[in-house]
Amino acid sequence: MGPLARIAREVRFVSGLGRLFWRIRKIAPDSESLICDDFEEACDRFADHTALVFEGETYTYRQLDALANRFAAWGLAQGVARGDTVALLLPNRAEYVPAWMGMAKIGAAAALINNNLTGAALAHCLSISGASHVLTDTDALSAIGSIRAGLARPLSYWVIDAKGELGEHQRALDLKAPKLAPERPPRALRAGLKSRDTALYIYTSGTTGMPKAAKIAHTRAQLYMRAFAGATNAKESDRLYCALPLYHSTGGLCGVGAALLNGATLVLRRKFSASHFWDDIVDHNCTMFVYIGELCRYLVNQPPHPKDRAHRLRLGFGNGLRPEVWSEFETRFGLTRMLEFYGSTEGNVSLFNFDGKVGAIGRVPPYLRHRFDVKLVRFDVEAEAPVRGEDGLCMPCPIGDVGEAIGLIKDDARGGYSGYADRAASEKKILRDVFTRGDAWFRTGDLMREDTDGYFYFIDRIGDTFRWKGENVSTTEVAEAIARYPGVDEANVYGVQIEKLDGRAGMAAITPGEGFDLAGLRDFLARELPNYARPLFIRIQPAIETTGTFKYRKVDLVRDGFDPTKTEFDLYFDHPLAHRYERITRVLYEEIQSGAFKL
């Protein structure tokens, strides 16, 4: 990179970071300014501008605030008081943000429940929320009806679009009823609350077990919403497309904040559709969109669309965009600016890639290192724990090496860690006595690598990286290699246990697309990956199960392993004698487990 390009890069980075820091500069744990105050300030400033577009309906900022006030009036009528929690079990819809903002206006918190959950997982999330009331709609009634026996206590369900007769403990909520006045509730109702108090509960995706409820203080909600209002540099003229679920932070806080704190218009879709994406973007004149990386992968796997390049998009922002998808996305759709970031709902490590460096999740330039309390520490993959030296302290990771990312826990807006509703789960995420006795750092659970320019690269989730033949295998890097093979739409890589062998062997669940040739994949991977990293087993299936935020679920795949009796999908073994993929039968499965092959 030449000197002029380096200067341009630094200007772009510093400008983006400067906008971000300016917007979050007044956030403080002891402040009485809450997230609903930010919302009301925006609604006053942009009162008659279009705030929201959803399924043919439009709402001005004034109307959106009035809707939030009606939810607040409902809460007061039901005796919801400061410090209480109300659960939201809703899909994306116009009432979503006003519902939880309305609770914040009266000092209550909202638990944002994944509306795709059913059975035990749904009962678990509702029970640990601590809520007595659930705001829901008719779409969720069937799931609700099947879980009552698993609840810790009876709940009252308020159906905002009720039609016909409702069941036990279910009541219609008419938001247009005269008694639900659209005036703002007195601010005195939340007097004494501080920004450090809980505003929301947002649940982890539950990719490896039951979801955990992360406590989101007003400071954290403000941090996400204000930060992206600054980082995206959105204006009143912008129209931001969001098809991500509002029950998670990327769509519900980052995307919403970028739009609604800047006077822009939020174009909301009930759920993501790859086939309708470009019609929505073009027809609504959208200029920005918020993504999860797999959303972009789905789009590049779609056949050509007449509106692929007919859009006015100037920016896409989000996280999890893998390098091979990133380059193809920009080239195919003509979008030259993607703002990738890294962060977790409950954590205190945030990184931004303002430069657009393909593959990097963020950057901390050497000259700004003192402003960022994020470090990489050496990590033992087998022990799944940071490496400690003779003095008992952790060891910093050299530039270029892979280590776990951690963030210093401080009692301020940016370094705070509020944890989960479950205190034991919160403690597990804290690493103590790291660089000095008594310090405490948040464990991200993510392995990363940093280069000499300060760019950070995501390597893998701890627990996903596994050891085979004495080597560490990154599932992410193997999946990226498989994704480069023609005809592979999706690849999910994980490790499976073989009896009598140490470590875990690689296995890949593949969703094939047009032109996929399994026989050629073996030779391709032999060229692309070292021997120890090549998947020993292949599973072919028409779709890969994901969470509501498009994260791959691996727990069921690991449980099935390469046993053909546990799945109806085709399984293949990289046969070391035949030098080709052989379909796994019960006989072959038993041979592998008996140690018949030198692997």
Image (spheres, rainbow, N blue to C red):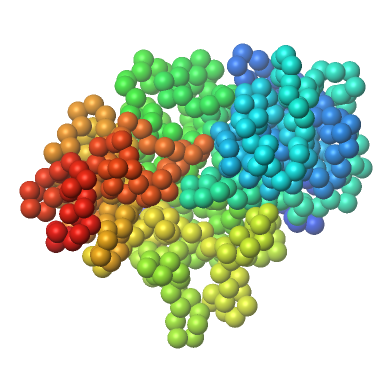
> Which is more toward the observer, 197 or 195?
197
> Which is more toward the observer, 69 or 20?
69
Q: Position of residue 114 (x, y in %)?
A: 59, 37
Q: Name the image quarter holding the C terminus.
A: bottom left
Q: Is residue 302 above or below residue 481?
A: above
Task: Give the side of residue 513 with respect to residue 133, left or right.
Answer: left
Query: Hey, which quadrant is residue 572 in on the image?
Result: top left
- In the rendered image, the residue lying farthest to the left is 578
Q: Is residue 339 visible?
A: no
Task: Give the side of residue 83 with respect to residue 281, left or right.
Answer: right
Q: Position of residue 204 (x, y in %)?
A: 57, 47
Q: Position of residue 551 (x, y in %)?
A: 45, 42
Task: Give the side of residue 538 with respect to residue 175, left or right.
Answer: left
Q: Residue at x 90, y 22 (%)?
A: 179
Q: Residue at x 72, y 14 (%)?
A: 164
Q: Residue at x 58, y 42 (%)?
A: 121
Q: Residue at x 13, y 38 (%)?
A: 519
Q: Is residue 345 above or below residue 292?
A: below
Q: Position of residue 471 (x, y in %)?
A: 27, 65
Q: Is residue 147 visible?
A: yes
Number of numbered callouts drawn: 0
Q: Is residue 296 above or below residue 124?
A: above
- In the rendered image, the residue lying farthest to the bottom is 390
